[in-house]
Amino acid sequence: MLEKFYQLFNPQTIIYVGGLGLLLGIVFAETGLLIGVIFPGDSLLFTTGLLTAGQVIDLPVGVVIGGISAAAFLGDQSGYWIGWRTGRTLFRRPRSLLFRPEYVEATRRFYHRYGAWVLVVGKFLPVIRTFAPLLAGVIQMPYWKYLGVSLTGAILWPAVLVSAGYFLGGVAWVQAYYEWIILGMVVLTTGPVLWRIFQSRLPTKVSV
């Protein structure tokens, strides 16, 4: 069962089976829909760079980055307007497979720390990149301000990760240790979010 789950969400499997179309759909979902929280965004973009270098994706790397940026930007806009229309009721919904109150609290903490720039920083953090646009809509962040940071994040995220995979694609040890590199990326990007979620579940101290 665990092996089937791994194969289903393995970045290479996603790209080989669904191509660029499925990749762009996942990027849109990760930034614009709650279901996107389950997808391996960072490792998927890095793997996209590797496979573009290996001509599995037979397009110029600039075109690939541009397509992913567009999908991420459109996903951001979808998330923002969903949050705007549903308001705070969205975050009062019952716990489910895809929704956890801790996700919301972790996102709130990142907003408190980074302000609107969480839409840039959060692109490199699982969970945060899914919930940050929704929360921006809920708090009705001025749309002109939202557009600027949203566009910046949508460009930087694939530019950094796809380019890293593309330029490392010809390095032999990267191919040999691909699984370990992906695991390391998951640990590095998920660690801060898990810590925030852990903090959000601790009882709040009441000062007397």
Image: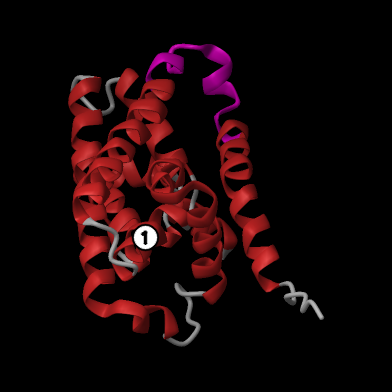
Name the residue at 47% across, 58% down. Answer: 127
Q: Which residues are magenta?
A: 166-179
In the rendered view, would you say 93 is above or below 47? below
Residue at x 24%, y 40% (from the top left corner): 151
Return the residue nearer the eye: 72 or 186: 72
Query: What residue is pinned by disc 1?
Result: 36
What residue lies at 58% left-to-right and 35% top-to-bottom?
Answer: 179
Q: Where in the figure is residue 58, as x and y percent of width and height?
A: 20, 24
Q: Is residue 182 above or below residue 29?
A: above
Please indicate, yes or no, whether residue 48 appears anywhere in the rendered image: yes
* Residue 44 horizontal side relative to residue 1, left or right: left
Name the quadrant of the C terminus. bottom right
Count neighbours of disc 1 (C-alpha within 10 A) and say few if under 14, some if 14 to 19, many if 20 or more: many
Magenta span includes 167: yes
> Which residue in the rendered view is the most extreme toward the front?
208
Query: Measuring 33% from the left and 58% from the top, which residue is drawn there?
Result: 133
Confirm whether the magenta stretch covers residue 36.
no
Three-letter residue code for mark 1: Gly
Q: Secondary structure at mark 1?
A: helix
